Image (cartoon, grey):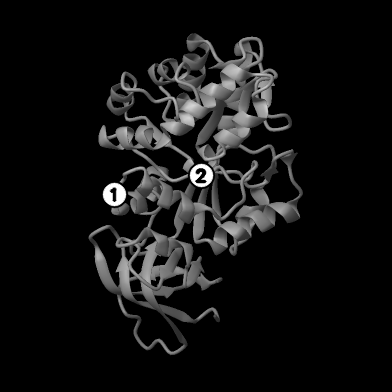
Amino acid sequence: MSDGAVLHVKGRVLAGPEDVRDELWVIGGRISYDRPAGARDVTTVEGWALPGLVDAHCHVGLDAHGPVDPETAEKQALTDREAGTLLIRDAGSPSDTRWIDDRADLPKIIRAGRHIARTRRYIRNYAWEIEPEDLVAYVAQEARRGDGWVKLVGDWIDRGAGDLAPCWPRDAAAAAIAEAHRLGARVTAHCFAESSLRDLVEAGIDCVEHATGLTEDLIPLFAERGVAIVPTLVNIATFPRLADGGESRYPRWSAHMRRLHERRYDTVRAAYDAGIPVYVGTDAGGSLAHGLVAAEVAELVTAGIPPVRALSATSWGARAWLGRPGLEEGAPADLVVYGADPRADVRVLAAPRRVVLNGIVVE
């Protein structure tokens, strides 16, 4: 499209779950609901339009072994784009991906800096590995480097105990979270286990990744404090394989991981029913492939979340939570067009008809 070109999207524009419009126009890369006068170079796209999808737990620039080169990171971002993911909350990466911000053809990224973990208590080459007395300083460092988020590793296997265990004393976590908030950043944490959750929530954490350890006694606390969860069910599906691999050395941990996996759907549905905000994240970029956002939405539906709410968890609701616009007047034209109504069947998300990023049809 030329600089003076206009994109016309018509059919059904899902500006909100119930806010359905007949058409929108893209002028200068931005959305307008007013037909431009005298437009001549017009490209028309027809179908059901959604705001660009959100993957709220994704790792661009990371693979199973640590940081990757820019070419690999670019392929990861392009794979997400092809799936309709146009906004990523990068939940921890050791790579510097700021160069992506200069690429109008790649998804927009909200970074949480680099993971912050306890010494020898996380995946090698991923995180800053520190002790509790340094937690406030490292949280402040990553709050300044990131885009309004900081990522802690809240629990991991304790090899001495042979099972999952919390990484941080409550007072250290509370001081670090308070410092992040002072600097204008929100804090999230990787948590598989039950035992890490209460201290982190009472310390003021904003979000928990995975949250497989949510139990009946903890759910009201999350709901009362408004702590969001990003379940990453496509990642939790790998727990049985992980458990099999660790069976001989850590049988307690393996059994625990299997229990968390077995009740994963009940956990997510109970959280949703209690009013806990739930958002879509795939955990792509570690051992998982990119481009799995549609599969994660389908998993939320399998867990019992109504389809429109699961859709909101990767579109309207997720964008509002992250402070980014959707299909609003004057917003950047980041949208995905489908051949059928995704509110009726979220499986439609797996087959985008067109992907529009910054007003340009890129797929």
Task: Please tell me which residue is depicted at 36% across the width and 54% down the height of the picture.
Answer: 311
Label 2 Cα neighbours within 10 Å, binned few <14 / some 14-19 / many ≥20: many
Q: Position of residue 143 (x, y in %)?
A: 55, 31
- The quarter of the picture where the C terminus appears is bottom right
Q: Which residue occupies the foreground of this view, 16 or 333?
A: 16
Residue under numbered circle 2: 234
Task: Please tell me which residue is depicted at 46% across the width and 52% down the height of the picture.
Answer: 54
Task: Tell me how far mark 1 sits from mark 2, CA to CA.
Answer: 18 Å
Q: Furthest-left residue in view? A: 18
Q: Position of residue 359 (x, y in %)?
A: 48, 70
Q: Which residue occupies the foreground of this view, 315 or 350?
A: 350
Task: Please tell me which residue is depicted at 41% across the width and 35% down the height of the picture.
Answer: 229
- Give residue 308's quadrant in the image: bottom left
Residue under numbered circle 1: 306
Task: Please tell me which residue is depicted at 35% across the width and 34% down the height of the picture.
Answer: 266
Q: Position of residue 180 (x, y in %)?
A: 50, 25
- The quarter of the picture where the N terminus appears is bottom right
